């Protein structure tokens, strides 16, 4: 399960600055830090660890930590090894495993230059159940009408419950136009028309049946914000009506069919505090506040020195739940398609009138801009549209997910 953690790199930049006014950043003062993102869950699966290096504010290139030795050790000295995914920051366990009750776990990392890191031993917190995942029509604080998604959860004991929420959203896409055929162009062909006294060139166009459907697609986005909730101020062991995501009523994602999968992580208090501090630092108000905290100490350290490390090795109990809905469930009008459609018609019959520009324009739109043929009015008149409006495979998948329910 690959997730987006762009907020972590923003936090790294805040760590390294700690100023409240704009300041020109000198790259020579930049301190490269190891960034670790690792959550071991009690779900039997291939577990993941992500290793990157921080980068200067004047760049946005993610720097992978390659060829590291990564493993998790439990209190019985059982070792679970991880291997790096090619050209990625992700290290995946060599076999599926899960965190179990009454056991403790530690993360161990050795980089290819010999630096060794180790986390504190962490145990699995109490389990959590998702009582309800639901969506309601609502007007938010900015006066925008839309859909608010909520989660209700319950802990399995009477201890304080600390939860972190993530999600995957998947939505169905139906393009306004259907691809008529694939176009193949020959090399330029030159002719002289003696009757009209004109030179011209054109391309022979061959049409091929479309091999796969491109009208219906499915797009998945993952959360990149931190949502936290706890019951420390409550008597019961429940946490109700946590706001997971707000969707404006005119957002295209709910125009056909929308799926929301929530991940609820039950965490210990120290992990919760760590993510709570990250959330505060990541907020606009905090980044402009004169009371900025300094470096956040996680539970991972260099075994031989006081090197700063960004990240936390988290052991959590996780539960998931999914719902489906669309705009009609809340009485809203259907949102407009997410992209404007540019429909161009090309008359390819009178080749002398085509001219060099028009002949190349059709070729350019079809071959370079990937405009798709959606209609032939009559022989020689072609109608093309920008790919977002006819070919879902240019921005999404045309394979229906296994979990999908229409």
Image: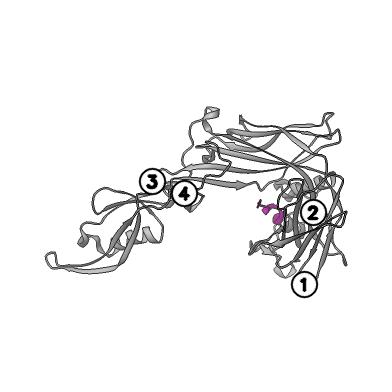
Magenta-drawn segment: 1-10
C-alpha gap between disc 1 and disc 3? 54 Å
Q: CA distance from mark 2 to mark 3?
A: 48 Å
Is label 2 in a helix, a strand or a loop? Answer: strand
Report the Cα–Cα distance between label 4 and label 1: 44 Å
What is the C-alpha distance between the residues marked 4 and 2? 38 Å
| SS at badge 4 | helix
- Looking at this view, is 126 or 395 the one in front? 126
Q: Of the numbered discs in the image, which one, if any, rests on residue 178?
A: 3
Q: Which mark is residue 113?
A: 1
State the mark number for residue 318: none
For image coordinates 14% across by 67% down, the residue present is 197
Residue drawn 65% across the image and 46% down it: 223
Image coordinates for residue 367, horizontal then vertical, percent = 38, 61
Q: Residue 384: x and y, percent? A: 35, 51
Farthest left residue in view? 195
Q: CA distance from mark 1 to mark 2?
A: 22 Å
Please provide percent x and percent y for residue 165: 71, 42
Residue name at image x 11 percent, y 65 percent: 195
Disc with the residue nearer the chain's start (1 vs 3): 1
**Mark nearer the N terminus (4 vs 1):** 1
Q: Earlier in the sequence, mark 4 or mark 3?
A: 3
- The residue labelled by disc 2 is 312
Q: Is residue 34 left or right of residue 250?
A: right
Residues 165 and 12: in front is 165
Residue to which mark 4 is pinned: 392
Q: Residues within 10 Å of mark 3 (few under 14, many from 20)?
A: some
- Residue toward you, 349 or 43: 43
127 shown above or below 56: above
């Amino acid at each position: 399960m690959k997730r987006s953690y762009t907020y972590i790199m923003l936090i790294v930049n805040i760590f390294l600055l700690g100023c409240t006014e704009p300041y020109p950043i000198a790259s020579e003062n930049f301190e490269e830090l190891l960034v670790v993102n690792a959550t071991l869950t009690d779900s039997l699966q291939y577990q993941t660890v992500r290793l990157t290096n921080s980068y200067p504010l004047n760049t946005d290139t993610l720097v992978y930590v390659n060829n590291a030795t990564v493993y998790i050790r439990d209190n019985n000295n059982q070792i679970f090894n991880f291997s790096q995914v090619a050209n990625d920051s992700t290290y995946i366990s060599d076999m599926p495993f899960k965190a179990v009750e009454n056991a403790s776990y530690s993360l161990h990392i050795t980089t290819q230059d010999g630096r060794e890191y180790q986390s504190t031993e962490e145990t699995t917190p109490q389990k959590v159940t998702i009582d309800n995942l639901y969506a309601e029509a609502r007007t938010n604080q900015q006066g925008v009408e839309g859909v608010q998604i909520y989660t209700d959860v319950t802990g399995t004991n009477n201890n304080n419950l600390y939860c972190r929420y993530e999600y995957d959203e998947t939505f169905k896409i139906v393009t306004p136009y259907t691809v008529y055929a694939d176009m193949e162009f020959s090399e330029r062909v030159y002719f002289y028309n003696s009757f009209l006294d004109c030179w011209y060139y054109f391309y022979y166009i061959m049409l091929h049946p479309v091999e796969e459907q491109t009208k219906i697609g499915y797009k998945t986005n993952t959360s990149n914000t931190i949502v936290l909730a706890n019951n420390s101020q409550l008597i019961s062991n429940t946490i109700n009506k946590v706001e997971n995501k707000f969707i404006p009523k005119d957002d295209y994602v709910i125009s056909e069919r929308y799926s929301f999968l929530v991940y609820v992580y039950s965490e210990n208090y120290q992990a919760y505090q760590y993510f709570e501090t990250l959330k505060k630092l990541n907020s606009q108000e905090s980044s402009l506040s004169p009371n900025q905290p300094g470096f956040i100490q996680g539970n991972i350290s260099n075994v031989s020195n006081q090197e700063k490390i960004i990240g936390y090795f988290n052991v959590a109990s996780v539960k998931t739940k999914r719902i489906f809905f669309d705009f009609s469930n809340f009485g809203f009008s259907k949102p407009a398609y997410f992209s404007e459609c540019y429909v161009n018609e090309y008359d390819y019959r009178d080749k002398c009138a085509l001219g060099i520009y028009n002949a190349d324009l059709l070729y350019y739109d079809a071959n370079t801009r990937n405009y798709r043929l959606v209609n032939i009015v009559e022989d020689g008149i072609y109608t093309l549209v920008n790919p977002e409006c006819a070919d879902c495979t240019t921005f999404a998948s045309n394979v229906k997910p296994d979990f999908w329910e229409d």
